[in-house]
Image: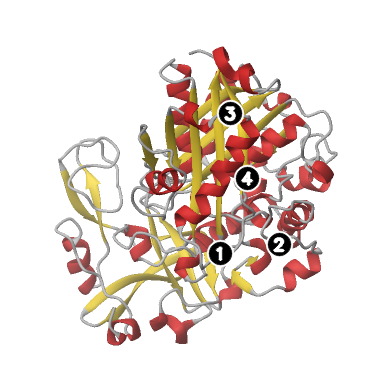
Amino acid sequence: MKGVNVIGIGMIPFGKYPEKNIADLGWPAVKAAIKDANIDARRIEAVYSGTARGGAMVGQRIMGRIGLAGIPIVNVENACSSSSGALAQAVIAVGAGVYDIALVIGVEKLTKFGGGTLPLDEDDWEVKLGLSMPGLYAMRAQRYMHDFGVKPEQIAGISVKNRANGAKNPDAQMRKEVTVAEVLASRMIADPFTLLQCCPTGDGAAAIILASDKVARQYRSDPIAVRASHLTSGRFMSGFRDMTSPEITVRGAKETFEEAGLGPEDIDVAEVHDAFSVAELLYYEAFGFCPRGEGVGLLESGATKIGGRIPVNPSGGLLAKGHPVGATGAAQVVEIIKQLRGEAGPRQVEGAKVGMSHATGGGISGFDHGACSIHIFQR
Amino acid sequence: MSDDKRSRKPVPRPSPESLPFWEAAKERRLLLPRCNACSRFFFPPSQRCRHCLSPDVNWVASKGTGRVYSFVVYHRPYHPAFEGDVPYVVAIVELDEGVRLLSNILGTPPEDVRCDMRVRVTFEDRDGASIPMFELAP
């Protein structure tokens, strides 16, 4: 594999845009990435577009809008890993030398569902029985509290941290700081999750431009290298599943670190998949930022705040920045690139050189998650 | 979906693979698929073992006992027909045979349900079907 770099990023602020269609949402993010890369848009050779619920031919709809169709466009659906999975495909293509410049898009419009929990596939065994995503994560929380003696107010601390970060992010859907008391007093959704411990539904789009080592510096003097690009699926497990140790992320993290030749101690900043408050604690442990069962200790030590040893979700994460499913992975990368360039303003992680993004999801029976994609970047 | 369908709780629509499970449930028996090749139970039912993919599978009676692996209390109905039931408990029950079922815990106030609580199967009749659910084991 040859070296692959990020030379352009763009996104629209996550939020609710019920009046816009999926192409309306997507093209401004693409335009912003093109401008950021300082590139003639006609140099883009291929497009990898991720959306979970946006429908068919979304990449074509977006590229057609800005007069850039007529090149290979691949549409990727992989639930919450749709655009991070699209990125993984684009990295393979550029790394293989097929293209020098590729565009990655993530886009989603969830307001069309009218709010509430995401509809899942009704043919799925567990979904037929009534399992919902808040319910699934709530079960992880119940078991985590039981196994490690954790209290609901400690889990709520994740929402407090990430919403404080989101308040500093102009692209975040939720921009208000909250206290533990406010989190716990918000409406109960699925015990122990109150409303402020669930990511909001909304709309959004993000875009990334990749360049080969050969051409990257023609466009920007500060290309950010892709150190690892990983995509995997969950293992099917009938019967026993340890819900407090996410199999797909534990294995994905190990493989990603191996690919990069790095370890958890080398990560300066991370965006992880905090769809619900407890998830971030499980991922601290899955990535080895702390030992098993010690996630709360890591959070309460302040290590994962901006300014701490390993800041996690400086963008506000899914909890505050928002989670337009297919756009999430690409938007995490936008944040990590900003952090590594030193462009993150009031939420800047000082001196960050190595950053990681992690998007995982897909509620289907027998799987911890359907898909997981992890990337590591280095300046 | 028609209003009538939304106001009634859904009933199982057995597939060829799951038919024996639901037929046994009508007789208040909990059957589980087990692989003759690797001797392991698996769930949900399928034509091949979920572990070793052998087609040599059969049905074995479960003891019907197990523990709550984890659970969630639903404060909002996911389906309108459950509106009168909130708050209700959705639980993953790990049977002593090793497989897990997604079900409800009946007869215990939601605030008293705990992980690892011992439970046993009970059945709830619904429109000609019978659905395995769980209650506190004595």
For the residue pair B23 and B84, the one nearer the viewer reads as B84
Q: Amino acid at mark 4?
A: Leu
The chain ID associated with circle 1 is A
Q: Position of residue A357 (x, y in %)?
A: 61, 36
Closer to us: mark 1 or mark 3? 3
Label 2: state its secondary structure: helix
Image location of residue A258, percent across then percent down: 56, 19
Task: Decide if residue A290 is in sight here.
Answer: no
Q: Which mark is residue A17?
A: 1
Q: Chain of mark 2?
A: A
Earlier residue among tags 2 and 1: 1
Dot in front, 4 or 1? 1
Residue A282, labelled with which disc? 4
How far apart are labels 4 and 2 at the CA level? 14 Å
Element on which disc 4 rests: helix
SS for dot 3: loop
Give the secondary structure at mark 1.
Answer: loop
Nearer-N-terminus badge (3/2): 3
What separation in Å lies between label 3 and label 2 (alpha carbons)? 49 Å
The residue at which mark 2 appears reads as: A152
Residue at 29%, 53% (x, y): give it.
B44
Report the chain holding disc 3: A
Q: What percent of the width, then of the height, locates residue A151?
A: 73, 59
- Residue A148, horizontal then vertical, whole percent: 68, 50
Look at the picture and state if A13 lies above or below A122.
above
**Residue under mark 4: which chain is it in?**
A
Separation of marks 2 and 1 at Cα, in angstroms? 33 Å
- Measuring 77% from the left and 35% from the top, which residue is drawn there? A310
Real-space CA distance between mark 4 and mark 1, rounded to the nearest whole angstrom: 32 Å
Alpha-carbon distance for marks 1 and 3?
29 Å
Looking at the picture, which amino acid does disc 2 mark?
A: Pro
* Residue labelled with disc 3: A39
